[in-house]
Amino acid sequence: MLVAVWLFVLVLSTSGEVVAQLEFEGAPINYATAPVHDPVASLQQKLDQGEVSLKWDDEHGWLPSVLEQLNVPQSSQLLVFSKTSLQLRRIMPSRPRALYFSDETYIGWVQRGDVVEVSTVDPEQGAIFYTLKQQITESPKFVRDRGQCLICHASSRTKGVPGHLVRSVYPSRDGQPHFGLGTITTDHSTPFEKRFGGWYVTGTHGEMRHLGNAIADDNRKDPIDPEPGANLASLGRLFRTSPYLQQTSDLVAMMVLEHQAQMHNLITRASFETRRAKHHDDVMNTALERPKDYCSDSTGRRIASAAEKLVEYLLFEDEFRLTSPVAGVSGFADEFSTRGPRDSKGRSLRDFDLQTRMFKYPCSFLIYSEAFDSLPEPALDVVYTRLVEVLVSPAGGDGVFSHLSDADRTAIREILSETKPAFLERLASISNVVP
């Protein structure tokens, strides 16, 4: 297996926050040996028991059926033409790799590829990687990766845990990145003009420019001319789109992907850090004959630090501010907005803004995820406490969250109070505030 890059690797940043990789192979994480309960593992169990079956498609193999069984919408399709994944030899600007995703599962498909590439999120173990051979069989098997993918997918760029990457590169004419020009790991904080290198992008974005839909010239001071690839409604003039399930590579879907990939990583890091800190305390408490529930100061600091970073990202503290309206051209935005709970006023954390920021109410929809709810109690306690402080305090959380207006904080608090029972319980116990 070529492990320099894999399903969600798009490019690695040469700058940014340095995060130590956490130990996760041994206790208490046991990443490689602990049972997993992710969507793919659940699907495989149903396949083995004959409860469901996959249908073979002559053009796309198992892909359409896998999308259906894992509830991954075709409207989420994104197309990446840089050679930055497992089956890189089959990828080029004229034959990009397709990526589809839901809140917790990511699926990659390459024309005439050997496998369908899958990554999904286990509530406790973070990103789990699988492949499914593209061959007709009565017993299709998702095969879990046993560590090679983690060479790239467990580093400072994934917050030090098994996780996901979205990257921007300067691609050559055959799709090979010009690594000498640098690469960028992207999320919702990345300036728009540095995003999407090596990707095809459909959608409008006004006067803003990005690196997508373009080949880089490494002999130029500015390797990519963004003008020809700006505000494209169609990709037909760039390559043959007919082999793909959709004819688009949606801009709004791309922005959501960037956000949620790092959100998943930060949830996993908070979980791992808390479990490792508590494990250390358990060992030391036994050795020093301290009470079993004793929590050291260092453990408290470690949990608080990981939880604070999670809350900051959850509330889009450093989000790049859009300077032009953004719109996609597929049905992704409408389909995405219909999922998830709404409050009595019809508001949802999935409601888009796309004028100056991504969402109308800047609190991540992944607060409803099973991974978030599965955080260890000490971490959840700190996260909820900080959320209440930020959403109730007139100062907006000690000035750290100054991007949130009073109206933002009130709306988020009210939405969560009606749609997230655990938040309402903490709100009532911590602040005595009636939402």
Image (cartoon, helix red, strand yellow):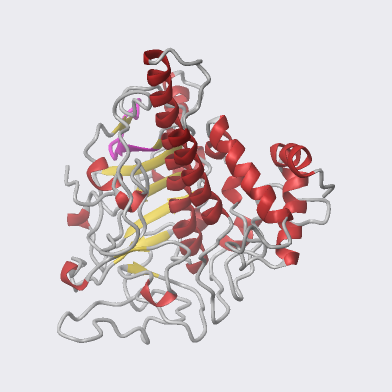
Q: Quadrant of the N terminus?
A: top left
Q: Quadrant of residue 412?
A: bottom right
Query: At which x and y percent is residue 408?
Result: 71, 63
Q: Is residue 230 above or below residue 390?
A: below
* Residue 188 in sight from this viewpoint: yes
Query: At which x and y percent is residue 189?
Result: 46, 66
| Residue 133 painted magenta | yes
**Residue for point 62% across, 67% down:** 402
Q: Quadrant of residue 105?
A: top left
Q: Nearer the viewer, residue 218 or 288?
A: 288
Query: At which x and y percent is residue 311?
Result: 56, 51
Query: At which x and y percent is residue 188?
Result: 48, 63
- Picture mark count: 0
**Residue for point 54% across, 66% down:** 330
Q: Is residue 234 above or below residue 199?
A: below
Is 115 placed left or right of 322 in the picture?
A: left
**Residue for point 45% across, 72% down:** 202
* Residue 109 in sight from this viewpoint: no
Q: Nearer the viewer, residue 290 or 157?
A: 290
Q: Nearer the viewer, residue 22 or 7?
A: 22
Q: Is residue 261 above or below residue 250?
A: above
| Residue 343 painted magenta | no
User: Which contiguous range is marked in magenta?
Assistant: 127-141
Is 219 placed left or right of 411 in the picture?
A: left
**Residue for point 29% across, 64% down:** 15
